[in-house]
Image (cartoon, helix red, strand yellow):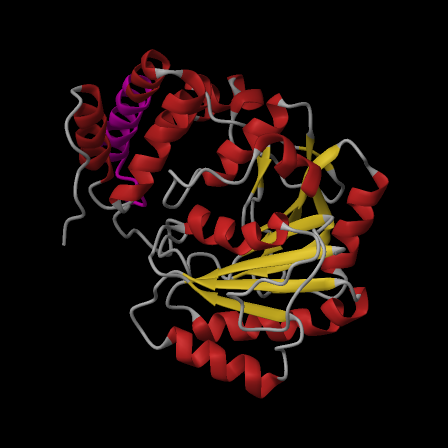
Amino acid sequence: MRLLIVIVNYRSADLVLDCLRSLEHEVRAIGDCRVSLTDCLSPDDSVASLRSGIAELGYADWVDFRPLARNGGFSYGNNEGIRPYLASSTAPAASTEGKARSGVPQYVLLLNPDTYIRPGALSTLLEHMDGHPRTGIAGARLEFPDGTPQVSAFRFPTIASELASGLQFGPVSRLLSDHLVPMPLRDHGFEAGWVCGAGLMIRREVIDQVGLLDDGFFMYFEEVDFCLRAHRAGWRCDYVPASRIVHLAGQSSGIVTDSAIDRRRRPPHWFESRHRYFVKNHGALYTALADLVYATAFSLWRLRRLVTGRPDTDPERFLGDFVRHAALHLTGSKRLRAEP
């Protein structure tokens, strides 16, 4: 199989169907391409809506739909969408509702349900991967519906980046510019540390070498961890802005990255995922130091904001939640449960 596109749904059936409509032309043009759609036990009528929508649109010949028995999170949903296609090169996936598939995919594309592709987006990514054999992961340019680009290429987080991110002070950010997690927007492609999982293509050999996404991440930081594992195994991660995908940021996750639009409180699993990423990849001591640096820097930023009278654009109760989660992990307490 040339390309497997994996979409995970959770209460976003209408968005998924719009996404599928945007894929139809290019999927059929590529030919040897399928969509693996999973649903993570949505509590609404998503399963029925997707079943009927796929049938009515005539997409059952290239969309395999698999409702899952539990909501294991974004990594779990993607992995369950990929695993049947890696298990055998010939045997059909008995649990899929679409036409039986065959063939192990050459490439896998992780695609958010709150996206729709611009013409040529998939073929551009495929051409880039074909032409750069050491590139194991490639990310598209994500943009808003009006064409405004979103930051979707990043460096790996470190203690230095936590300092700059928490402090939000121009001179420090300029001094640590090579450590800032968001990379500057450019019109040409370049090598990044990691790219956003909303539109991320993976060479199958990378999965063969480093495995699938870590199911331990419920949501957030899973693509950061995966790209770091690939990086340590010697693979490049490229940002390919010629491939354009519209991302309705936050529609599927509940977190809108533009804080001026949405200041909703960060969910507990965001803090859990951040902690898991740092401990897994850098150890407990490094994580504790990163937490201390960020909490101190962010506290100074909050004080400076009050003194200068700047508007509050941070997520609600963020500092308190951050410190509480860090303290719970430091003392070995149980994870903080979601609060109403």
Vertical arrangement, residue 155 with respect to residue 90, above or below = above
Residue 152 falls left or right of residue 279 = right
Magenta run includes residue 301: yes
Q: Residue furthest front?
A: 91
Residue toward you, 49 or 297: 49
Placement of the C terminus among the 4 image quadrants: bottom left
Instruction: Tell me which secondary structure the magenta stretch mostly adopts.
Output: helix
Residue drawn at (29%, 17%) of the image: 288
Range of residues picked out in magenta: 292-314
Dividing the picture into quarters, in which one does residue 235 lie?
top right
Dividing the picture into quarters, in which one does residue 313 lie?
top left
Magenta run includes residue 102: no
Q: Position of residue 332 (x, y in %)?
A: 18, 22
Q: Position of residue 45 (x, y in %)?
A: 35, 77
Dividing the picture into quarters, in which one does residue 94 lie?
bottom right
Residue toward you, 310 or 68: 68
Q: Where is residue 306 in the image (x, y as percent from the top left)?
A: 22, 34
Residue 103 falls left or right of residue 332 = right
Residue drawn at (50%, 35%) of the image: 224
Residue toward you, 163 or 245: 245
